[in-house]
Image: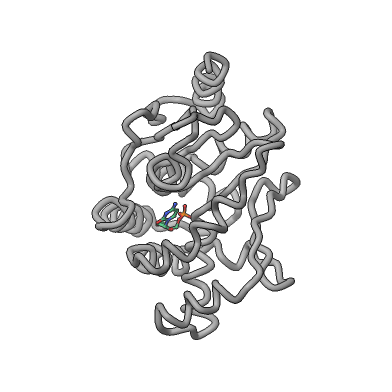
Amino acid sequence: MKLVKNIITIDGPSGVGKGTLAFSLAERLGWNVLDSGLLYRLVGYLNCKEALETTQEIVQFLNESKIRLITNFNEGICEIEINDRVLGKELRNENIASKAAELAKEAEIRNAIIKIQRDAYDSEQGLIADGRDMGTIIFPEAALKIFLQASPEVRAERRANQLKEKGMSVIMHDLLEQIQLRDEEDSNRKISPLKPADDSLVIDTSNLSINEVEEKVMENFKKL
Ligand code: DC
């Protein structure tokens, strides 16, 4: 397989810092970001909020809709344009995330969004692809594949700090439980489970700052 230098994949469990790293690398390189988790969250949202109850209904709706990912650098987040509606913040809560993790186990759902993910890559511009199976399934041709890891306790602590900064109250025990539950679902599913690609660079971020992680990635990128 011919390796492509302007795709960097970042996979890893929830709360490990993939999104923050993806945006700081994208700004530095002038590339786009694919937050693939947002597409699974959209599936969760369609199921919870728009009453698309069966997998078949969800897949049909996805196939018939115009869906595009937008990299919003001002806010440091991706958004989804779907049939001229833009969804972003509505998708970022723990109820939608657990629904997303549940529906992400289904092959029909995963297949329905493969093309949207691959279409996020524009060879002229470059892409940072953030998710669980970016290096293994969606962009195996990426020359640089990163896998981030950190203990559930460290990730829960980081998430708690983010929520506190936003003025939200936090129950540490619940946060840890949610993270462990999603780890279990993401790692143990039969199709596209969370795991490092054979040729990925595994970085444990537990004792590293975001800048230190970014420098490690850039060091390896420069060697390509
Ligand atoms: O990255 P996130 O927390 O927004 O993802 C939400 C869920 O979506 C995650 O728990 C599992 C699923 N997901 C997936 O199965 N494959 C991806 N590439 C990204 C997310």
Question: How has the structure been colored for display?
Answer: one colour
The correct choice, above or below, for 116 with respect to 30 in the image is below
Kindly indicate the quadrant of the structure image that contains residue 121: top right
The correct choice, above or below, for 117 with respect to 18 in the image is below
Residue 95 place in picture, x, y as percent? 44, 69
Residue 20 place in picture, x, y as percent? 57, 39
Residue at 49% from the left image edge and 37% from the top image edge: 9
Viewer-proximal residue among 20 and 58: 58
Residue at 49% from the left image edge and 28% from the top image edge: 143
The correct choice, above or below, for 18 with respect to 114 in the image is above
Kindly indicate the quadrant of the structure image that contains residue 146: top left
Residue 54 place in picture, x, y as percent? 40, 83
Viewer-proximal residue among 223 and 159: 223
Viewer-proximal residue among 174 and 41: 41
Residue 96 place in picture, x, y as percent? 47, 68
Q: State left or right for residue 218 relative to residue 84.
A: left
Residue 160 visible in the displayed image: yes
Q: State left or right for residue 63 relative to residue 16.
A: right
